[in-house]
Image: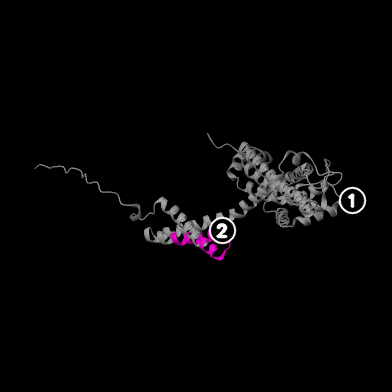
Amino acid sequence: MTITATPPSTDVRPSRSQLTTGRLPSWAVWSMVGGSLAAMLAVFAIVAVGSGDDLNIAGWLISTGVVYLILIFTVSSIVESRRKAVDRLVTGVVASAFLIAMVPLISVAWTVVVNGIARFDAEFFTSSMRNVVGEGGGVLHAIVGTLLITGMAALISIPIGLMAAIYLVEYGEGTRLGRGITFLVDVMTGIPSIVAGLFAYALFALFFGPGIRMGFMGSIALSVLMIPVVVRSTEEMLRLVPNELREASYALGVPKWLTVVKVVLPTSIAGITTGIMLSISRVIGETAPLLITAGFTNSMNYDLFDGRMQTLPVFTYTEYMNKGIPPEAYIDRAWAGALTLILIVMLLNLIARIVAKVFSPKTGR
C-alpha cells in the first residue's frame, strides 16, 4: 500500500482590509481629528461672518472635541466593538482634559513672554530703581533680595523639614508625638500666606517694636510656608523606600542612624530634591508676607538684618499698582519682573533635576 504525501497548499489569499478585521487603522483617528477641526471651523467661520464678530476660538475647539468624541465612539462601535469604543472614548476624554489643563499654562507663559521681553536688556539686569522716575531703571535690587531672602528661608526650612520627616518615618511612627506633629504639619500646609507674614511681623515687633522691616523677617515668614511642604514631600519619599533595604542594613550590623544616612536618604534623594524645589517654587513668588515683613525699597540692600529689602514679587506688584508717567514704562517693568521670576523658578527646577540625576542611586549593572 503506497501512501502519497499531500503537497502543502500554495493558495495565498489576499489579506483583509483593516476596516473589516475589527480594528481601525492608525490614520483613522487623526483623520477624524482633522475632519472635526475643519468642519467646526467652517461652521464657526460662517457664524462669525454672519454676525460680524471675530472667530470664537474657544467655542470652535470645544465643539471640535465634542464632535470628535461622538464620531470616534460611533465609528469604533461599528468597526471594532463596544468595549474598544468605550476605551477610545475614555482615552479621548483624558487627552481633552490634558489639553484643557495646558491652555491656561501656555496662555500665561505666552502673555508674560510677549509683554515682558520688551524690557529684557542690559540696563534692566544691571541697575536698580534708585533715583529713577519714568523710563529706565532695573530689577537688580529685587533679584538680589529675592535670592537672599529665599536662600535664607531654604537654609532654615530644609534641615528642619528633613529631620522632622525622618523622625516621623523612622522613629516616631505610631507614637503620640508623631501623630501630633503630623496633625500640626497638615494644619500648617493650609494656612494662608498672609498669616505667615503676620506671624513673623508680630514676632519681631515684640523684640524690636512696631514698624520693623528687614529681609530676615521675610525669610522667617517664607520658612513657615516651606517647612510643611518639605516635611510632607520628604515623608512620602521616605515611605517609598522598601523595608528590605533597611532590614538588610540592620542584618549587617549597621546602626539605625547610619542606615538612614547611607541607605534611606540616598535611595530617595531624587524625590526629596524635587519636593524641596517645589517648596522653594511655592514661596519664591509670595507677595503678601513680604510686603508686611521685608517691605519695599528702590535701593540695593545686601544685609538681611538691616533695613527694607525688595523682592521680585513685590517689585512687580508695586510697579503695576503705583504707575507714574509714562505708565507704559512701569507696566513694562512689571511684566519683565514677572518674566524674570518665572525664569528663576525654571532655572531652579532644572538644577534640581540635574542634582537628582547625579546623586540618585545607580541601578544599572
Which residue is outermost to the bottom?
A: 51
In the figure, is residue 326 to the left or right of 19? right
Question: Which quadrant would residue 120 be assigned to in this image?
Answer: top right
Note whether residue 50 is visible: yes
Could you tell me what secondary structure mostly forms the magenta stretch? Answer: helix
Q: Position of residue 131 (x, y in %)?
A: 85, 44
The disc at residue 57 is 2
| Nearer to me, 252 or 79 | 79
Q: In the rendered structure, which segment of residues is drawn in magenta? A: 45-71
Residue at position x 58%, y 43% in the image: 244
Q: Amino acid at mark 1?
A: Phe
The disc at residue 207 is 1
In the figure, is residue 47 to the left or right of 84? right
Distance between the alpha carbons at the discs numbered 2 and 1: 58 Å
Note whether residue 264 is visible: no
In this rendering, the label closer to the viewer, 2 or 1? 2
* Quadrant housing the N terminus: top left
In the figure, is residue 197 to the left or right of 246? right
Residue at position x 57%, y 60% in the image: 56
Q: Amino acid at mark 2?
A: Ile
Sequence-wise first label, 2 or 1: 2
